[in-house]
Image: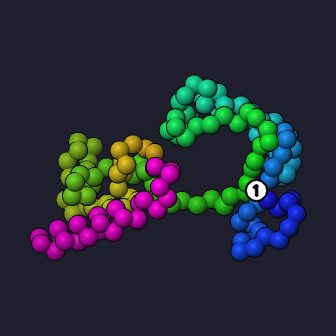
Amino acid sequence: MPEEPGEKKGVLVDQIATFKANSLEELAEKLQITDVETFKETVQRYNELVEAGKDVDFGVAPEHLSAIDTPPYYGTHRHVRFTQGCSGIVVNEYNQVLDVHDQPIEGVYAIGNLAGNFYGSIDYPLSIGGLNLGHNYTQGYVVGKMLAEQ
């Protein structure tokens, strides 16, 4: 953590900007959050969803929910990144894009991150980073082979 003493070896400091605090107010200050009340309300809302066992706001699977209610609290600055779209275009087993009646649209294909529900739901299995790479390559190969045979 940036405020911890000692040399940070092998990492970029801006990549480890994680802060520790004994209260949500203190954490908001360290994270330079200007609207502390909204921050606290957001944490409260999240904890309500955890208590209910269902995240109706973002669809996070229940096994990934954990209450934010016991200090110390940790927060980090993250750069927005998009690695996997889990609710993409609906396709069939040949990666043909389907219309609203679940019929293939001739000549239109979607593979990899564009093809939706590959994982069986709107959630990406967070415990397996990079899982999307294999199906990107495989689906591209399958569609390419199928088109070459036409």
The residue shown at (66%, 34%) is 67
Q: Nearer the viewer, residue 8 or 149?
A: 8
| Image coords of residue 53 (percent x, y) | 55, 28
- What secondary structure is the stretch in magenta mostly built from? helix
Q: Which residues are magenta?
A: 125-150
Question: Is 42 displayed left or right of 130 in the figure?
Answer: right
Specify whether residue 141 is painted magenta.
yes
| Image coords of residue 129 (percent x, y) | 49, 59
| Image coords of residue 81 (percent x, y) | 58, 61
Local SS, label 1: strand
* Residue 36 seen in render: no
* Residue 135 seen in render: yes
Please determine whether, in this image, residue 133 is positioned above or below residue 50. below
The residue shown at (39%, 42%) is 121
Q: Nearer the viewer, residue 78 or 17?
A: 17
Judged from this view, the residue extending furthest toward the left is 150
Question: What residue would you read off at disc 1?
Answer: 18
| Image coords of residue 33 (percent x, y) | 81, 48
Please determine whether, in this image, residue 26 is positioned above or below residue 133. above
**How crowded is the residue under tag 1: few (<14 C-alpha within 10 Å), some, or many (20+)?**
some
Query: Where is the C terminus found, in terms of image quarters?
Result: bottom left
The residue shown at (71%, 66%) is 15
Name the amino acid type tagged 1.
Thr
The residue shown at (85%, 41%) is 22
Judged from this view, the residue extending furthest toward the top is 52
